[in-house]
Image (cartoon, coloured by chain):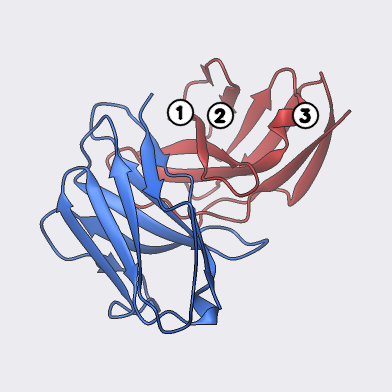
Amino acid sequence: DAKTTQPTSMDCAEGRAANLPCNHSTISGNEYVYWYRQIHSQGPQYIIHGLKNNETNEMASLIITEDRKSSTLILPHATLRDTAVYYCIVRQNTGNQFYFGTGTSLTVIP
Amino acid sequence: GAVVSQHPSWVICKSGTSVKIECRSLDFQATTMFWYRQFPKQSLMLMATSNEGSKATYEQGVEKDKFLINHASLTLSTLTVTSAHPEDSSFYICSARDLRANQPQHFGDGTRLSIL
């Protein structure tokens, strides 16, 4: 079962930073936080993952709180193509299954 | 980057037909692949875990005789929807775990199945 809680939907102005929160208060010490997004009628696309340190790649930044009970995905300059459903998932790095929650539907507004 | 390919991308067939969907990892080996189903406006629901060389593990409520899974090689898993009916119409998505160090799970682009 999904172990994360995310807002159902968010809007963001094009060119602004999109900050997507995720609560994972029951996360255990060896579980990573993964972020994926799904654009309509496509498979989920990997964005970023992390354990406890903040992470950054070419797509986004991941900020994990010190107690690891929540995290924020940051898209620094949102574009219209970033409109998608964003899923936050916790799982052991050596584990197998991903269980998806309901995700956040992000709409980037021109 | 790592790619997972699904085929076909969409299929329409008559009720009672069996439909096979293929999932391939193109540039990495995957001893484990996963099959998901997604209904409109809903999230992905894990159906089963496909294990190379052994039987698949099905999630609670998923009929193993209805959804046959074969994982005969390290790069290919197939899902067969047997005697499909309109209620089986859905978006089926596979994923594969790249076992190289610190690699995430990769997803195919899905198969849209419509049963008439």
**Cα distance between the residues tagged 2 and 3:** 26 Å
How far apart, in angstroms, are the residues tagged by discs 3 and 1?
A: 26 Å
Q: Find disc 3 in the rendering and name its residue.
A: A80
Q: Residue at x 56, y 43 (%)?
A: A88
Amino acid type at circle 2 is Ile
Q: Earlier in the sequence, mark 2 or mark 3?
A: 2
User: How far, Cα to Cα, is label 1 from label 2?
Assistant: 8 Å
Query: Is tag 3's residue or tag 1's residue first in the polypeptide sequence?
Result: 1
The percent coordinates of residue B31 (x first, y second) are 19, 46
Whether residue B83 is situated above or below residue A31 in the rendered picture = below
Q: Nearer the viewer, residue B113 or B54?
A: B113
Using the image, tell me which numbered label, if any, was put on residue A64: 2
Disc 2: host chain:
A
Looking at the rendered structure, the kind of residue marked 3 is Leu
Q: Are marks 1 and 2 in contact (CB under 8 Å)?
A: yes
Q: Kindly identify the residue that appears in the image at 63 percent across and 30 percent down.
A: A73
In the rendering, what colour is chain A?
red
Question: The chain drawn blue is chain what?
Answer: B
Which part of the image, by quadrant, shows the C terminus of chain B? bottom right
Q: Is residue A81 above or below residue A27?
A: above
Residue A28 visible somewhere in the drawing: no
Are labels 3 and 1 assigned to the same chain? yes
The answer to whether any part of residue A76 appears in the image is: yes
Tell me the residue that label 1 is attached to: A50
Q: Mark 1 belongs to which subunit?
A: A
Q: Nearer the viewer, residue A98 or A70?
A: A98
